[in-house]
Image: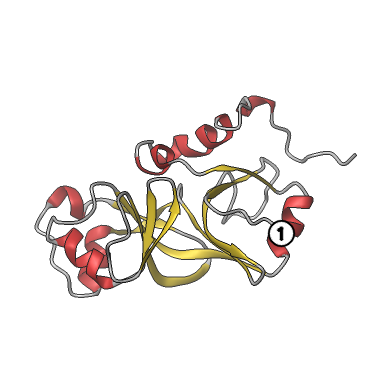
Amino acid sequence: MSYLEHQFLIAMPGMEDPNFFRGVTLLCQHNEEGALGITINRPSSDFTLADVLSQIGIACEDETLAAMPVYEGGPVHPERGFVLHTGQPRWESSMVVGQGISVTTSRDILEAIGAGNGPEKFLVALGYAGWAAGQLEDEMRENAWLNVMARSDIVFDLPDEKRWEQAVAALGINVTSLQPSGGHA
């Protein structure tokens, strides 16, 4: 069985769940037990990086860093933090999740970011999207999602509001040609 490693899940236009409407989710893990992903285009209206760092006792003197948005990574465990970043997984709890993309869940990366010694590019998210065994596969058969190989430029270099349409474009599809729901043959 093949799994959707290093892939973006792109919500189809007909996705009604507000957690995923026009969402792009980077799959960090997908196996026989289920899937876990981080949504990359939902900036939080409640938190900045300064808020998150302050809550765990990490100082951040750089005002530009402090003002960075924190993303709503998904509806599951919104108290858990994830850092998507460029570079190799050199932190305490890191793994590669795409070409040029790693995810870290340990405090040491946040300490490095607060001190100005973090990865070159990063995105901090709270919460994740999770699927039980077979659930994501069922949703894909129901045409809820498109998938494409994850790209670091979409995660780190584009404004939030451009990530969905650029992920769709990475499939070679004009976003205006997408229909709210797919057909079945």
**Residue matched to label 1:** 1
Give residue 46's position: percent from left, percent from top.
36, 60
The quarter holding residue 104 reads bottom left
Give residue 151's position: percent from left, percent from top.
45, 40
Vertical relation: 147 (above or below) 95: above
Q: From this viewpoint, which residue is outermost toward the right?
A: 185
Quick one: SS at disc 1?
loop
Would you call the spot at circle 1 few (<14 residues within 10 Å), some (14-19), or many (20 or more)? few
Marker count (numbered): 1
Vertical relation: 141 (above or below) 169: below
Q: Is residue 21 left or right of residue 45?
A: right
- Residue drawn at the location 29% of the way across and 71% of the way down: 92
- Residue drawn at the location 23% of the way across and 47% of the way down: 120
Looking at the rendered structure, the kind of residue marked 1 is Met
Q: From this viewpoint, which residue is outermost toward the left?
A: 61
The one nearer the camera, 16 or 172, is 172
Give residue 50's position: percent from left, percent from top.
21, 61
The one nearer the camera, 129 or 149, is 149
Q: Is residue 57 left or right of residue 33?
A: left
The quarter holding residue 94 reads bottom left
Vertical relation: 167 (above or below) 126: above
Way the structure is coloured: secondary structure
The quarter holding residue 29 reads bottom right
Give residue 101's position: percent from left, percent from top.
39, 50
Q: From this viewpoint, which residue is outermost toward the front?
A: 1
- Residue drawn at the location 19% of the way across and 51% of the way down: 65
Query: On the rendered image, what quadrant is the N terminus found in?
Result: bottom right
Query: On the rendered image, what quadrant is the C terminus found in?
Result: top right
- Residue drawn at the location 63% of the way across and 27% of the way down: 173
